[in-house]
Image (cartoon, rainbow, N blue to C red):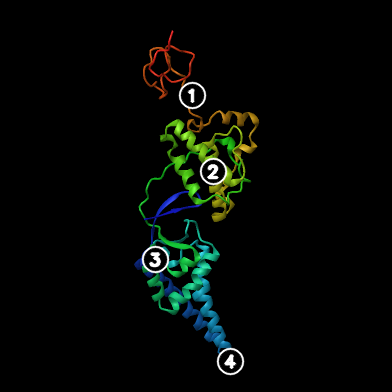
């Protein structure tokens, strides 16, 4: 397993694709590309028979580059890392952080693949995959990508409670570029486990994480917003931005901040429906002072019964009369 952190701050235990499955996927891609190349070459030879030898050579080189290099790059870019062979083998190319690849990633992988796969018959790629701990070839190393298996057993993941409705869209202008993936992962892990934590411990953890997040974003936590709700709202904003970059604005249309168009009364009513996990821990009133001889039920030292107005812990000695 290889733990990656996605743009949505999800820790993914992905299985890197090993050499046999990757070799089979590359072989299928090469067979399809060669079939297209042969068909295009035959068509060009038949249609350019009247040209001189230099023009035919130039067309042959252009066809080779277009079909065997340009087409695979375009397919990986448009399919977000899934070529024909990879789809057949259940593989996918992703970024190092688990996100979908873009044109620059596919371009680097395709150009280096010409050297380590086509020109060396895959020998360099096989050696690099054997040496790499995650089975990456040189194209993956330079492009910052990883080929993973998609057909793996689905494991249940922790549920991240949504932020209160009155916080929807409130942090859309926040600069999240300086927040590292480690902090996003810590925020998500806290939100998935905060229901299991002691209220006071969970509240202090939320305050610390919110303080770190506010320091990196350059914007303080708004007054009156619970730190856990602040973390959930900012995490939701990060997820919405990643979804927009990967799939376009239509993918997050359902997550549009409907609270912005609601009235003040509706927002006030929604504010009262804050989940209990976002509220501060209840303050337990001190117990009766009389008759306490040890630590109180709240974990505080017992007060001296002889000095009820004194807040100092009980020492066990009776003060002089």
What label sits on residue 132 in the rendered view? 3
Residue 24 position in % (x across, y down)? 37, 69
Q: CA distance from mark 3 to mark 2?
A: 34 Å
Could you tell me which secondary element the residue under label 4 belongs to?
loop
Could you tell me which secondary element the residue under label 1 belongs to?
loop
How packed mark 2 is, by other alpha carbons closer than 10 Å (few <14, some 14-19, many 20 or more), is some
Contact (Cβ within 8 Å) of mark 3 with mark 2: no
Q: Nearer the viewer, mark 2 or mark 4?
A: 2
Residue 58 position in % (x across, y down)? 57, 85
Q: Could you tell me which residue is drawn at 50 percent across and 47 percent down?
A: 183
Image quarter where the C terminus lies is top left
- Whichever of labels 3 and 2 marks the residue nearer the N terminus, that label is 3
Image quarter where the N terminus lies is bottom left
How packed mark 1 is, by other alpha carbons closer than 10 Å (few <14, some 14-19, many 20 or more), is few
- Whichever of labels 3 and 4 marks the residue nearer the N terminus, that label is 4
Label 4, on which residue? 52
In this view, the residue in front, 303 or 31, is: 303
Q: Could you tell me which residue is drawn at 48 percent across and 52 percent down?
A: 6
Label 1, on which residue? 283
Q: Nearer the viewer, mark 3 or mark 4?
A: 3
Residue 252 position in % (x across, y down)? 56, 48
In this view, the residue in front, 108 or 177, is: 177
Residue 251 position in % (x across, y down)? 55, 50
The total number of labels drawn is 4
Q: Nearer the viewer, mark 4 or mark 1?
A: 1
Could you tell me which secondary element the residue under label 3 belongs to?
loop
Label 2, on which residue? 212
Could you tell me which secondary element the residue under label 2 belongs to?
helix
Q: CA distance from mark 2 to mark 1?
A: 26 Å
Q: Could you tell me which residue is drawn at 44 percent across and 43 percent down?
A: 189
- Whichever of labels 1 and 3 marks the residue nearer the N terminus, that label is 3
């Amino acid at each position: 397993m290889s733990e990656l952190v996605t743009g949505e701050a999800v820790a993914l235990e992905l299985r890197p694709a090993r050499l046999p499955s990757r070799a089979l996927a590359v072989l299928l891609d090469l067979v399809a590309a060669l079939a297209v190349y042969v068909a295009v070459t035959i068509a060009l030879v038949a249609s350019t028979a009247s040209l001189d030898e230099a023009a035919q050579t130039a067309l042959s080189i252009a066809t080779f580059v277009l079909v065997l290099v340009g087409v695979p790059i375009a397919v990986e870019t448009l399919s977000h890392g899934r070529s024909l062979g990879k789809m057949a083998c259940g593989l996918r190319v992703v970024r190092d952080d688990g996100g979908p690849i873009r044109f620059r990633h596919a371009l680097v992988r395709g150009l280096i693949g010409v050297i380590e796969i086509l020109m060396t018959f895959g020998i360099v790629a096989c050696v690099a995959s054997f040496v790499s701990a995650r089975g990456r070839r040189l194209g993956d190393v330079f492009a910052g990508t990883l080929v993973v298996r998609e057909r793996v057993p689905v494991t249940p993941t922790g549920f991240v409670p949504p932020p209160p409705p009155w916080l929807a869209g409130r942090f859309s202008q926040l600069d999240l570029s300086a927040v590292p993936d480690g902090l996003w992962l810590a925020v998500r892990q806290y939100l998935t486990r905060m229901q299991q934590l002691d209220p006071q411990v969970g509240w202090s953890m939320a305050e610390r994480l919110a303080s770190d997040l506010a320091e990196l974003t350059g914007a303080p936590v708004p007054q009156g917003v619970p730190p856990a709700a602040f973390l959930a709202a900012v995490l939701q904003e990060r997820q919405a931005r990643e979804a927009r970059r990967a799939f376009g604005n239509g993918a997050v249309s359902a997550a549009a901040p409907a609270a912005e168009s609601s009235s003040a009364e509706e927002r006030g009513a929604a504010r009262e429906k804050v989940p209990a996990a976002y509220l501060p821990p209840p303050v337990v009133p001190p117990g009766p002072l009389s008759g306490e001889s040890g630590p109180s039920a709240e974990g505080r030292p017992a007060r001296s019964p002889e000095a009820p107005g004194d807040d100092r812990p009980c020492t066990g000695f009776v003060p002089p009369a």
